[in-house]
Image (cartoon, coloured by chain):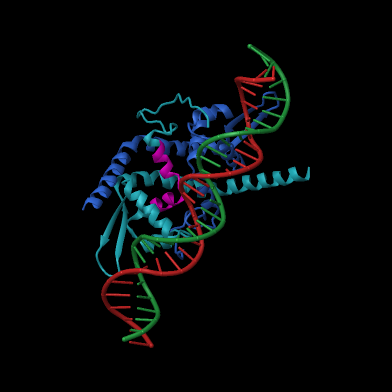
Chain colours: A cyan, B blue, C green, D red
Amino acid sequence: MYLMDSEDKSPFGYDAFRRTCPSHTVLEMLASKWVYLVVCALRRGRLRNGELARKLEGITPKMLTQTLRVLERDGLVRREIFPVIPPRVEYELTELGQNLAGLLSQIRTWSEQHAPDIKDARARAAAGQEGDLVA
Amino acid sequence: MYLMDSEDKSPFGYDAFRRTCPSHTVLEMLASKWVYLVVCALRRGRLRNGELARKLEGITPKMLTQTLRVLERDGLVRREIFPVIPPRVEYELTELGQNLAGLLSQIRTWSEQHAPDIKDARARAAAGQEGDLVA
DNA sequence: TATCTTCGCTATCCATTAGATACATATATA
DNA sequence: TATATATGTATCTAATGGATAGCGAAGATA
């Protein structure tokens, strides 16, 4: 563990480089694949648990619930329960969530746009590794 | 684990909602607190390992090295070694990395800007939990 | 009557990852 | 001899992520 020495403060008095800063914990919360995808998925409107599960390929019920609970706790998602049988629960972005969704879907778009570049870089790195072994 | 059914394709032929899509693995790589912070830290110019370590409060040498290796492998960071004693190594963003840094620092700024909102939401959630116990 | 289905979870276990700590290397300095 | 510098690696443990199974309640089906 190193000491720290961060000179560039943000204009808001918060500094994500400091681990005790609230903004650092926000960044930590956002740094999750499923947070990205859930927020992007809800961008077009409210969805039910099952609809989200079908949209997010590979998510387990546990991770979906866990991610939605975190987003609800942090005020990015609103949860509405309809007391019917079988149960019906709907999720939608709050205003704060919508605000964030714009940025996150830019990251998603960037990922899709630059996926080939990064695939190439990875291939070059793997080839380089192989070369190291031969040499 | 659920089945999937994603209708909204991106215009690039890639779809981050599909776990086999290369863009999904890119999103996965980006979904890391230290990736965010390292890329943001390098935005202003090249830095040495020790300079990064001091800037990123709480990072361990292992995580710093690991994060830099991933970023180098994916073509976002360039590593330059000067063969002197003691060793001197400098890191800087590639063009692709610079491109991404713009988006990531928007997320960082958002985190700092909205940290109070999220702090409040968390406090309300915690209070609600407490109320549940009392009731 | 007895299972089967649906939906939105919860519980449990195991694999993977993150994080803490100590050490390696080579040289200059005290 | 001991310390400091700079950039890491090695090892161990704690935390997180992911796979699988099951619950509960009403209605449909056999």
Q: Residue at x 51, y 52 (%)?
A: B24
Coordinates of residue A36 in the picture (x, y in percent): 43, 49
Residue D21 % position (x, y):
46, 69
Residue pushed farthest left? B135
Examine the structure image and report whether residue A123 is included in the region drawn in magenta.
no
Residue at 40% in and 33% down = A20
- Magenta span of residues: A24-40
Left/right of residue A110 with respect to residue A83 in the rendered view: right
* Between A71 and B30, the one nearer to me in the picture: A71
Residue at 24% x, 52% y is B132
**Residue B48 visible in rendering:** no
Relative depth, front residue between D24 and A107: D24
Residue at 40 percent across and 31 percent down: it is A15
Q: Is residue B10 above or below residue C21?
A: below
Q: Position of residue B12 (x, y in %)?
A: 51, 53
Which residue occupies the foreground of this view, A120 or D27? D27
Give the percent coordinates (x, y) of residue B42: 53, 31
Residue C26, picture quadrant: top right
Q: Residue furthest right?
A: A135
How would you classify the magenta stretch by its main secondary structure? Answer: helix
Q: Against B56, is A106 above or below?
A: below
Does the image show residue B87? Answer: yes
- How many numbered marks are there? 0
